Image (cartoon, helix red, strand yellow):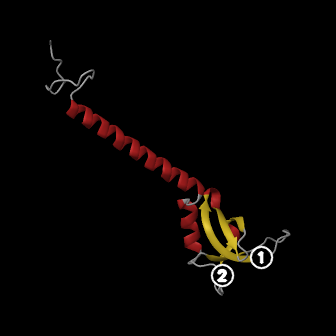
Amino acid sequence: MTVDICACGAPRRPGGSDCRECHRKTVKRYRERQARHRQVQDQLIENLTVNNRDTREKFEARCKTRFVVVLAGPGEEVDDFAGMVASFHPMGMLTVVDTDGRSHSVPLHKVKEDIGRKNYGISQ
């Protein structure tokens, strides 16, 4: 009976193409690579859904707190309202939760910091 030898010089596993130690190292590298790939995907999904870095930086340059007033345009049927920014989306869009708990998708240019904010019943 002949014993097949791994590239490192150790005997191969039965039915395998490498020894136990080389197999362990290969599987470890594969799992680390998969974990990094999952982490990158999770960051991309978060960046595209609730925490877009560009929109967050633009918002933080304009406002010091997440409490804001949403200003309606001249021809719009909605009124101005106050609320808190809940998430940041691509293309300068924000999700703002008003004092009644309803969420609104609002462009960044319509948001102004609420300087005289009162207790809206929303904890920061």
Q: How far apart are marks 2 and 1 (CA)?
A: 18 Å
Q: How crowded is mark 1: few (under 14 residues within 10 Å), some or many (20 or more)?
A: few
Q: Is residue 86 visible?
A: yes
Kind of residue at disc 2: Gly
What is the number of callouts on the image?
2
Q: Position of residue 24 (x, y in %)?
A: 26, 36
- Residue at image x 77%, y 76%? 80
Residue 42 % position (x, y): 49, 51
With 109 as the anchor, is 4 left or right in this view? left
Judge the density around disc 2: few (<14), some (14-19), many (≥20) Cα neighbours within 10 Å.
Answer: few
Image position, residue 5 (x, y; %) = 16, 21
From the viewer's perspective, is 1 left or right of 93?
A: left
State the residue in front, 124 or 70.
124
Q: In the displayed image of the protein, which residue is found farthest to the top? A: 1
* Residue 121 numbered tag: 2
Across and down, in percent, residue 4 comes to: 18, 18
Name the image quarter holding residue 121. Answer: bottom right
Q: In which quarter of the image is the C terminus?
A: bottom right
Q: In this view, does 44 lie above or below 83?
A: above
| Residue nearest the viewer, comparing 62 with 38 | 38
Identify the image quadrant of the N terminus. Answer: top left
N-term-proximal mark, 2 vs 1: 1
Q: Which residue is drawn at 60% across and 63% down?
A: 88
Q: What is the three-letter code of the residue carrying label 1? A: Asp
Task: Name the residue tied to disc 1.
Answer: 80
Which residue lies at the image location 27% right of the left edge and 20% below the top edge?
Answer: 15
Q: Quick one: 64 or 34, which is closer to the camera?
A: 34
Question: Is there a contact, CB below 8 Å, between mark 2 and mark 1?
Answer: no
Query: Is any atom of residue 108 visible in this view?
Result: no
